[in-house]
Amino acid sequence: MSEIIFDSRAVNQALDVMAEKIAADEVYIVGIQRGGAEVADALQHRLQKTAAVIHRGNLDISFYRDDLDTIGPNPEVRCSELPFDLTDKQIYLVDDVLYTGRTIRAALGEIFDYGRPASVKLVVLVDRGGHQLPIAADIVGLLHHAGDDQSVKLMTDPDGWYIERRQVK
Amino acid sequence: MSKRLLIKNGHIIDPANGIDKQADLWIEDGKVVAIGGYNGIADQTIDASGKIVCPGLIDMHVHLREPGQEWKEDIESGSRAAVAGGVTSMCCMPNTGPHIDHAGIALQVINRARQVGLCNVHPIGAVTKNLDGRELTEMRELTRAGCVAFSDDGAPIWHAGVMRKALEYSATFGYMVIQHAEEKELTKGGCINEGWISTQLGVKGMPVEGEDSMISRDIMLARRAKARYHVAHISSQRGVQMVREAKAEGLKVTTEAAPHHFALTEEEVLGFNVDAKMSPPLRTEADRLAVIEGLRDGTIEVIATDHAPHHEDDKRCGLSCAAFGIVGLETMLPVSLDLVRGGVLSMSDLIAKMSCNPAKLLGLNSGTLSIGAEADVCIFDENATWTVDREKMVSKGKNTPWHGKQMTGEVTHTIKAGRVVFENGTIC
Amino acid sequence: MEALKHLFGIADLSKEQIEHLVNLGDSFIDINRRPIKKAPTLRGKTIINLFFENSTRTRTSFELAGKRLSADVINISASTSATSKGESLLDTGQTLAAMQPHVLVIRHSLAGTCEFLAEHLEHTAIVNAGDGAHEHPTQILTDLLTLKQAWGSPEGKTMTIVGDISHSRVARSHLLAAKKLGYHMRVVAPKTLLPSEVERYGCEVYHNFDEALPGSDVVYMLRIQTERLTDACAFPSIREYHEAYGLNAKRLKAAGEDCIVMHPGPMNRGVEISSDVADSLKSHILNQVEHGVAVRMAVLATLCGGHPEEKPVSKKKSSDEVKQAQGSLL
């Protein structure tokens, strides 16, 4: 059983607001594969209108997870790409949905293997609650309280993106 | 007091005397006294209905490892394995430690076998002292001690000059030389047949030419010496053909085949199976079929196992390091019966290759059920099935390629000089 | 796709498994190029490199692969002779397995060593780092990653492999991989260095190097061991070998513009390959070395993860249960 909790209009509005908060002359944006990378692309698209200099990177945190078991059966590991030196930079780390915080923890670990940024700000499209680690987003597009027996996902259809909540088990 | 044993209603096959019929076999005082009617009362009766009653089998090529390597096998365990396989006479090879290259060791082996009392053991004497291919042994002395032929088995006589002298000297006195035909300079470092399988496994192969070239050379030398030359465990197509041609020419050239060489091919080694490693190695299907054809047309007159027991430690070290050889006494008959089932040989011809044929080559008086002969008898059910379990093998050696395989044909009784020594799985 | 328990050889891998390992290796290249070459993927895993043959690059490559993924890596060099004098191969294997490593990486001069040990060490994943003249799967995965970087896919390409085919595990593994992935193989060697019935792999066999070159997309040179001169009478002299089977820039011209050159190393310059080729832009030899680390990371990560129910566990039941309990706490 699933229901749409945010439609494409709500998602687009949220992205606009997020982009405004990030806007600066020079921006460093790192998306987490795969959903976070797509959100980062959407933000980049909006920021380009303001003619800012944007540095884009992506992280695949497969090798940084605390459950290695996902690597074996998951042949689709995407490359991490950070085509800039992040030392002493302010980095916006972007993900689609913030849930337990474990993905973010892994991503932070990976970022620090590339260098020592001045700061890292966490940007998420949806914060669905249920955090298991002391991790909170700095910029949140949409807020929703989902139960532990529910999954919240960024979905796409011809009209654009929407957020779906699904009952699991 | 005389003891009478009656084997009732069996199908008696005695190739030496051309007997192939349903009849009773009477044994008294350890000798065969009658086939058919006999006037007397039996002390002991074995019902052999539906079974074949034949002379106790002879295996002219075994390794008993005593003296020297008793942890692999000894004369007692080897004798027990023999009677469990229906074998009542066997010839043991001289590569013991010390070697059977002088009369003392030959006598020791014979006496030990007599003490065990299950199976005749006839030693094969060494051709050269220390099996080192240089100086001939005292063949006359060894013969007097009980050796029935000569061989350096695992250490082939590579030196053509020595081989020539060995053939000439043995021919002088009518002795037979048995050669493990292998040109070791060609097979050095090899562990399986050279070909597609050895290429795929990346192990060094033993080319068939190693066997063929030595058979070829030996036949030429035997021709000049007019010697009796016997090729041990022949495994190659060309080798069989050379023996066939030598026979046609009238040379005194004979040969034997081991059950694994007519039952299995080199494919058995795939997966690095150490229990399919022996020398000569399992060869190609063409070679296997040639050996079968040689058995059919009489080129190969003897079936012998090359029973080569090894300790687990000698096999459990990977294919390249593992010792050569497999055990064979307990599976000789059922594996060979496939030749009858496959229409290659009649039952009588098959039994001949494991009884009177080797007896004739070696001058043994066993291998027949003639009236007055020592009553060595094998009784088997040609249709009974059983599964080979290496843990249940009687031999100390557990190195068999047939572990877990089903066998058709089971020895039910073995009788040595009128005494039942093996009965339905139990050694008495 | 079937889970990998051990890596014995290319023979046991499906096309999908090969491609998975190569692709995974591809994604590890990046970690090796970063300033901080470390990911926590294999934290808490123990890997033992057990090398019975000398090897610098393969051992170092496995060691770096394990360490860069945060595994604990132990190297043991045991010369074959020392082992045969005292402890048997099996005892060495069992002793190390009793220390509960997750992976044993083994190189041995005898073919089938890994299969043999795996039969007796049920609970340790085994990786073949080269066994006699049998297989060298991680080298082939390395080469395939190099070819992927060069061409995308090896399908339809022609690899000409030259040298001591007879004693080469690399050649055998490539001949097997070629069939699965659809590239053509030409083998070039004098008859003294060709194994029996090699054509049954489905390759073309050449004795004349110059005739084999036109149409080749990659020329793969094998190391010639000078021991073969004396031990096996395989060729009369280095000079004559180089003249007939050595690769130099002039000879390579026959292969055409785009042909690349590979070598599993270590090279004998002036024997099977000249410096004018080894150091040229056509040479992918150092790429192979770089990719070797990435591919071995992929192999170790695949064997250590992904299949909790088949993960190495202790032989004894009691400690088995303890381990599982610990696992669930993590």
Image: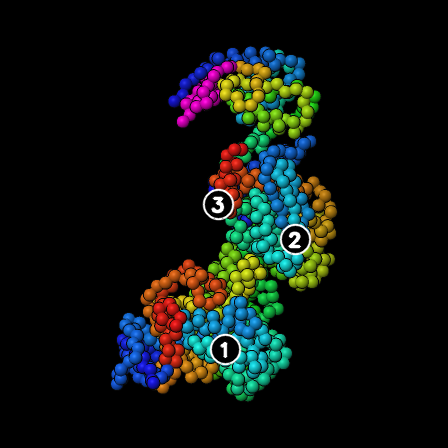
In the drawing, does residue B389 fall left or right of residue A101?
left
Cα separation, mark 2 vs mark 3, equals 31 Å
Subunit under mark 2:
C
Number of marks in picture:
3
Distance from disc 1 to disc 3, alpha carbons, whole Å, reads: 48 Å
Q: Where is B151 relative to B259, above or below? A: below
| Residue that numbered label 2 is attached to | C78
Residues marked 2 and 3 touching at CB (< 8 Å): no
What span is in magenta?
A142-169
Q: Amino acid at mark 3?
A: Lys
Q: Residue at x 58, y 66 (%)?
A: B187
Could you say where residue C146 lies in the image, as x and y percent from the top left? 62, 40
Q: Which structural element holds mark 1?
A: helix
Which residue was labeled with disc 1?
B112
Q: Amino acid at mark 1?
A: Arg
Q: Is residue C315 left or right of residue B352?
A: right
Q: Secondary structure at mark 2?
A: loop
Residue C316 % position (x, y): 50, 46
